[in-house]
Structures are given as C-alpha cells and as structure tokens.
Image (cartoon, helix red, strand yellow):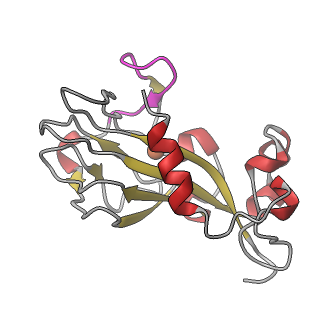
Amino acid sequence: MANHPWKHHDARLSGGASPISITVRPLTLQQDNAYFQISNPLLGTAMWIAVHNATVENGTLHLIPDAFSTLLEHSRDPDSDHHIRCYPDEAQAIPIELPAGGVVFFAYGTPHCTRGNHSHSDRAGAAFHFVHASCFAEDPALRANVRPDYYPILTGPEATGGEKEYGANIADTWPQEIEKALGARP
Ligand SMILES: [Fe+2]
C-alpha cells in the first residue's frame, strides 16, 4: 500500500431535522461515482459517520447492496439546487441503523440515500470520500479540476498529516472539526 496512497476526496456534513433546530432535506438515491466518475468504483470509498444515533425513524443512511458495478443514469434532483440522483428500485434500499459514532463504508458505485427525519431529535451524518491515488494517474481531469489541498494524501510515503496541504499537522483534530461543522449548520 505504501506506493498507492489513499487520498481524502471531500467532506460533507448532512443533517437531519427537528422542529426546533436544523432542517435539512433528505438526500435522494445517488451513486457517488456519478460525481467522481473513476473507472473502477471499488477504488473509491465513502465513509458515513453517524453523529447522532441513526435510526429508521430519523432517516438514517439507506443503501442498495451489491449494486456498485454499474453506473446508473443520473439527472438533476428536482428537489435540490445542486444534487443529482438516480432512480433504481427504492424498495431495494436497506436502512443502516447506527449508534452515534458508528461508521459505514461503501464503494463509490453503491446507490445510497438518507430519508426524512420523523423524530424530534437531530440526526446528522458526516460523509467523507476517499479515492485511491492510482485514479489520479489514470485520470488527469481528476487531478486538474480541483485545488491540491482538496486531496490531502492520507497514507504512504507522501503523507504528511496535512503539513504539505494545509501548512499544519491536523492529525487528531477530528473532534474539533465535527464541533466546528455542527456549529456552522443552518
Ligand atoms: Fe453520496
């Protein structure tokens, strides 16, 4: 693995809703590879972390297992100003219930979504995306279209804990980053 480091692709915080706090729409079914378009969807992985207990009632992550190999047609989600979505059989999506702090990993090709929050508590999830560094070699567009600091190198001999990308070592700053993200929510 040393010569094939993984890179962090992006980070996104998505949330649930309660009548008195944040209100965030559920995310409709999508494959992350519709955005990233790497040739092998198994070389990219999403990491979805339950910030709060994530249940069926509050709209936890749902995914369709064993459906990663074919890129489905995506189109603009009519309920979103920037997301795209696909239309596989919704009934195939299974809920993943997690305690706060629980983590799900799934390949870039896996259709997934979150549902509406029908509880009275927040339900936030933090989504991070990782891509194998070999994808950058095969796809110059992937390299060229984003800022270098968007792809910090996480493993292998080039990994610096963020020093190279951000000018500071950010190892072990996860709790502060989550606090910051939750503090910035609408
Ligand atoms: Fe996604």
Task: Indicate left or right for 185 with 155 as reference.
Answer: left
Farthest residue toward the bottom? 2
Asked if the magenta segment contains residue 83, the reply would be yes
Task: Indicate left or right for 165 with 46 as reference.
Answer: right
Q: Quadrant of the C terminus?
A: top left
Depth order, front residue of 40/47: 47
Q: Position of residue 97 (x, y in %)?
A: 21, 60
Q: Position of residue 146 (x, y in %)?
A: 78, 39
Q: Residue at x 77, y 65 (%)?
A: 169
Question: What residue range appears in magenta?
Answer: 77-87
Task: Indicate left or right for 91 with 178 as reference.
Answer: left
Task: Indicate left or right for 124 with 161 as reference.
Answer: left
Asked if the magenta segment contains residue 110, the reply would be no
Q: Position of residue 179 (x, y in %)?
A: 48, 50
Tag count: 0
Q: Residue at x 32, y 30 (%)?
A: 22
Q: Quadrant of residue 25?
A: top left
Q: Quadrant of the N terminus?
A: bottom right
Give the overall secondary structure of the magenta segment. Answer: loop
**Above or below 88: residue 64:** below
**Above or below 165: residue 185:** above
Depth order, front residue of 165/27: 165
Q: Residue at x 80, y 72 (%)?
A: 159
Depth order, front residue of 169/9: 169
Q: Quadrant of residue 94?
A: bottom left
Query: Is residue 71 in view from this perspective?
Result: no
**Above or below 19: residue 6:** below
Depth order, front residue of 100/176: 176
Q: Position of residue 37 (x, y in %)?
A: 63, 45
